[in-house]
DNA sequence: GCCCTGAAGTTCGTGGGACGAACTATCCGG
DNA sequence: CCGGATAGTTCGTCCCACGAACTTCAGGGC
């Protein structure tokens, strides 16, 4: 197990390894709903509202062609749909279908539970401390909302 | 920007979004060395020592066939080599080539710098606090050493 | 010493996913 | 009205993930 001489983990290695852990848990969770991690991520982003391709691509950090393929595949699975944009006939807005909304909700909730369990070894105050510090890193680096806050849903309709 | 009502980020969203951020930075860093993120990860793991395929697969969380392909491609790039295992003629040990060692070192160092910059908005004490808490999550969940500690190299030969 | 089970790794088929270049259709300002 | 820019798709290419099936070898039991 890689550690510093005194057994601790440095901040850089901690960030990389926790990302590795979260990726693995996210993929596991996605698999449970017959999703790939990328499809799950797309669904999570769309839980807030429909988006145009440009904005989606910017949020997910994907090349335009990559997003076209991802939306194609997710549309083929019946989870999202492309809607015409009444204000720009070039543009489409990608939205969750009814089924996609349900799957997204379940995937999101299941993933929240699994990720929360990862912090099971921390006391509540420590968890809050971790949230405060890691949240600062996330906000400082302007990380897009690829995953919502519990209770932070559109129109505040999510139970807290 | 997704936040709780009071503007903070919860621990679950913070973990997922920081993973998203680290993934993006890791991919960017890999690209600088003509690597894919998976190849970079393989090189980082091999910095410690050569490994058998079974152990590598377990560490990276990959199916055996996936690892065969990844090692094939990385070998074709001249960065790793398969060596016969004198104790088991079925087995191979995967090791960095000279060039692979160099590239791994540069990639690792460059990635450390980039990841460290992500925490630039935190004071040193805050960074230590984040390392302590996130390190606890990493250790509690037995995350493999997919990224070394600075100074934690084999035989302690890395400058601290 | 032989045989059987299990291990180590590869091959094959399949599908997802990433990117850049080039394309078509549309928008909008001059 | 036209030209430059935008929105998104298509195409070609390669990487990457998995499961099933395969070959080769190791080792323990009889």
Image: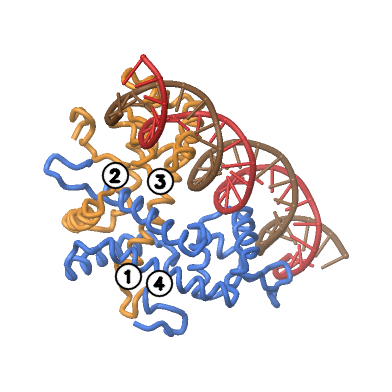
Chain colours: A blue, B orange, C red, D brown
Residues indicated by labels 2 and 1 sit on the same polypeptide chain: yes
First in sequence, mark 2 or 1: give its number. Answer: 1
Q: Secondary structure at mark 1?
A: loop
**Which of the two discs, 1 and 4, sits closer to the camera?**
4
Subunit that carries the residue with mark 4: A
> Residue tagged by mark 1?
B9
Residues indicated by labels 3 and 2 sit on the same polypeptide chain: yes
**Which of the two discs, 2 and 1, sits closer to the camera?**
2
Subunit that carries the residue with mark 3: B
> Residue tagged by mark 4?
A109
> Residue tagged by mark 3?
B26
Subunit that carries the residue with mark 1: B
Q: Quadrant of residue A112?
A: bottom left
Q: Rate crowding at label 1 as few (under 14), some (14 to 19) or many (20 or more) other CA atoms within 10 Å.
A: many
First in sequence, mark 1 or 3: give its number. Answer: 1
**Viewed as shown, does residue A75 lie left or right of C1?**
right
State how far apart marks 3 and 2 are (Cα): 17 Å
Residues indicated by labels 4 and 2 sit on the same polypeptide chain: no
Residues indicated by labels 1 and 4 sit on the same polypeptide chain: no
Q: Are marks 3 and 2 in contact (CB under 8 Å)?
A: no
Q: Nearer the viewer, residue A43 or C1?
A: C1
State how far apart marks 4 and 2 are (Cα): 26 Å
Q: Secondary structure at mark 4?
A: helix
Q: Secondary structure at mark 2?
A: loop
Relative to A70, say whether B146 is above or below: above
> Residue tagged by mark 2?
B144
Quadrant including the C terminus of chain A: bottom left
Q: Residue at x 45, y 45 (%)?
A: B28
Q: Rate crowding at label 4 as few (under 14), some (14 to 19) or many (20 or more) other CA atoms within 10 Å.
A: some
Q: Rate crowding at label 3 as few (under 14), some (14 to 19) or many (20 or more) other CA atoms within 10 Å.
A: many
């Amino acid at each position: 197990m890689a550690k510093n001489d005194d057994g601790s983990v440095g901040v850089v290695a901690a960030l990389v390894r926790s990302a590795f852990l979260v990726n693995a848990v996210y993929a596991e969770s996605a698999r449970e709903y017959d999703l790939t991690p990328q499809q799950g991520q797309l669904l999570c982003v769309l839980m807030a509202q429909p988006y145009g391709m440009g904005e989606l691509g910017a949020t997910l950090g994907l090349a335009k062609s990559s997003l076209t393929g991802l939306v194609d595949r997710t549309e083929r699975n019946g989870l999202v749909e492309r809607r015409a944009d009444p204000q720009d006939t070039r543009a489409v807005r990608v939205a969750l279908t009814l089924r996609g909304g349900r799957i997204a909700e379940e995937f999101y909730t299941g993933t929240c539970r699994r990720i929360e369990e990862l912090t099971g070894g921390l006391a509540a105050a420590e968890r809050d401390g971790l949230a405060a510090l890691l949240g600062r890193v996330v906000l400082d680096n302007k990380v897009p909302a690829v995953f919502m806050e519990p209770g932070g849903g559109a129109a505040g309709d999510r139970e807290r």
